[in-house]
Image (cartoon, rainbow, N blue to C red):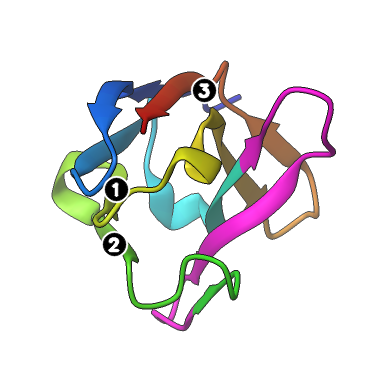
């Protein structure tokens, strides 16, 4: 089974930027779609951004215009560029992939902390 490993999290001041990476151990062409979710303390995990195999993207209203999801097939990596970060973006960010079979795969998560 393909594994997902996130990186790029950290501590940043409000207004700053971070780029998260999700590296797959195999080809991301095997996935129907990939996405980033996040979970803040005491809150449910929520979808942040998603990209399908044909390149269709969608974003949570709270991040539209600030975050961009993209992928690099050659590197088997999906990215989340996060700009104009806000304290409310603080959360653990998880990479997620769904295979054509419907089987989901989650990464282990990376912490993003935005200070005010």
User: Considering only vertical position in the picture, is 23 above or below 11?
Assistant: below
What range is drawn magenta here?
Answer: 38-57
Please rate how many residues cluster around mark 3, counting C-alpha atoms within 10 Å: few if below 14, some from 14 to 19, many from 20: some
Q: Name the residue under label 3.
A: 3
Whichever of labels 3 and 1 marks the residue nearer the N terminus, that label is 3
> Residue at image x 32%, y 67%?
66
Q: Are the residues at dot 1 and dot 2 in contact (C-beta closer than 8 Å)?
A: yes
Q: Name the residue under label 2.
A: 70
Q: Name the residue under label 1.
A: 79
Please rate how many residues cluster around mark 1, counting C-alpha atoms within 10 Å: few if below 14, some from 14 to 19, many from 20: many
Q: What element carries label 1?
A: strand
Distance CA(mark 3)–CA(mark 2):
18 Å
Whichever of labels 1 and 2 marks the residue nearer the N terminus, that label is 2
Q: What element carries label 3?
A: loop
User: Considering only vertical position in the picture, is 109 above or below 75?
Assistant: above
Q: Which of 113 and 108 is in front in this view?
A: 113
Asked if residue 1 lies left or right of residue 13, the reply is right
Q: Any magenta on residue 83? A: no
Q: Which quadrant is the N terminus positioned in? A: top right
> Residue at image x 46%, y 20%?
110
């Amino acid at each position: 089974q393909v594994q997902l490993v996130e990186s790029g999290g950290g501590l940043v001041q409000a207004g700053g930027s971070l780029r998260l990476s999700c590296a797959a151990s195999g080809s991301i062409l095997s996935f129907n779609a990939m996405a980033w979710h996040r979970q803040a303390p005491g809150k449910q995990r929520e979808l942040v951004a998603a990209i399908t195999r044909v390149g269709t993207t969608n974003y949570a209203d709270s991040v539209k215009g600030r975050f961009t999801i993209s992928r690099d097939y050659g590197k088997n990596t999906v990215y989340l560029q996060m700009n104009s970060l806000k304290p409310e973006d603080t959360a653990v960010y998880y990479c997620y992939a769904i295979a054509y079979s419907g089987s989901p795969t989650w990464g282990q998560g990376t912490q993003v902390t935005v200070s005010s």
